[in-house]
Image: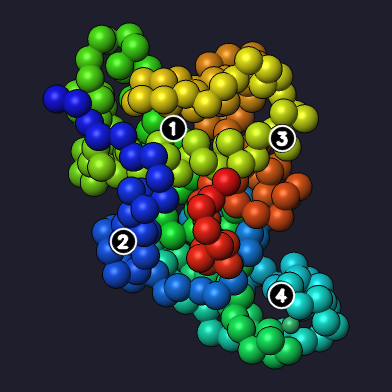
């Protein structure tokens, strides 16, 4: 059975990525979503410190409003909770996301840990590692994507449709970041691919470039995701609300 390849924003389906759709129901849409670049090894450690009040958001943000840049404009408002899913190992739980009001513009901003992609429940690391695993199983065992999906944790809820969405979303993020990433690793010869296997191979090629001493794995990926957010001021994967409605993604 061939799986349909999704290639455009509309085909990816915002219904999947918005609160009303699958599987991100429960996420409150935010006007502005900014990355919170942190040094936590996992979002679970981050959430524990948030709930224990160990993160001083005044220190994290400084005195300039993260939205408009005006001094002392912003103030913290009630945080919201969103579901986060990690695949390796599997865990599903709610985390708190802090919110701030920009009083000059009258909009709210949330600080989303850099490990997450806006409008996705699964962590960026989970999405990419799942794609790498499927690529590897397909290549080594000569099986199709559907069979390879069985290698993912039981009850993880990853369907072929969701995997196809991740493939588009992750590659869109990598391609958008290509110029920055090319300054950190040798990406010569990496070209935009087509088809399931070609696109999976492209994800593998990107990740391999950032794991020069071994097969692509979580450690290198974790460093890459953090470094990109720290450098570019945006999430490596995913399209925040402020970028939506601006035409086709690059
Ligand atoms: Zn402001």
Answer yes or no: do the residues labelled 3 and 2 have beta carbons within 8 Å? no
The residue singled out by tag 1 in the image is 129
First reached walking from the N terminus: tag 4 or tag 3: 4
Q: Which of 170 and 176 is in front in this view?
A: 176
Give the label on residue 179, or none: 3
The residue singled out by tag 4 in the image is 67
First reached walking from the N terminus: tag 4 or tag 2: 2
Disc 1 to disc 4, C-alpha distance: 33 Å
Q: At numbered mark 2, what does the secondary structure look like: helix, strand or loop? A: helix
Question: Residue at horizontal 71%, vertical 35%?
Answer: 179
Q: Does the residue labelled 1 lie within 8 Å of ligand 1?
A: no
Q: Image quarter for residue 103?
A: bottom right
Task: Characterize the local packing of mark 1: few (<14), some (14-19) or many (20 or more) Cα atoms within 10 angstroms.
Answer: many
Q: Nearer the viewer, residue 200 or 13?
A: 13
Disc 2 to disc 1, C-alpha distance: 24 Å
Q: Is residue 114 above or below residue 217?
A: below
First reached walking from the N terminus: tag 2 or tag 1: 2
């Amino acid at each position: 059975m061939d799986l349909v390849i999704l290639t455009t924003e509309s085909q990816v389906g915002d219904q999947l990525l918005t609160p009303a759709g699958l599987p991100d129901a429960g996420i409150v849409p935010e006007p502005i979503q900014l990355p919170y670049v942190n040094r936590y090894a996992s979002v679970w450690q981050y959430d524990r410190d948030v709930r224990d009040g160990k993160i001083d958001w005044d220190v994290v943000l400084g005195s300039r409003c993260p939205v408009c840049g005006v001094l002392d404009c912003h103030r913290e408002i009630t945080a919201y909770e969103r579901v986060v899913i990690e695949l390796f190992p599997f865990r599903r739980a709610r985390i708190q996301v802090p919110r701030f009001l920009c009083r000059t513009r009258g909009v709210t901003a949330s600080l989303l840990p850099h490990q997450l992609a806006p409008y996705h429940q699964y962590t960026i690391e989970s999405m990419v590692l799942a794609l790498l695993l499927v690529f590897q199983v397909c290549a080594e065992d000569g099986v199709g994507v559907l069979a390879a999906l069985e290698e993912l944790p039981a009850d993880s809820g990853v369907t072929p449709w969701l995997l196809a969405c991740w493939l588009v979303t992750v590659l869109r993020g990598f391609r958008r970041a290509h110029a920055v990433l090319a300054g950190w690793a040798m990406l010569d010869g990496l070209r935009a691919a087509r088809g399931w296997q070609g696109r999976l191979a492209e994800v593998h090629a990107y990740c391999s470039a950032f794991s020069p001493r071994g097969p692509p794995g979580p450690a290198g990926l974790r460093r890459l995701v953090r470094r990109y957010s720290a450098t570019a001021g945006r999430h490596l994967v995913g399209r925040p609300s402020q970028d939506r409605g601006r035409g086709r993604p690059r």
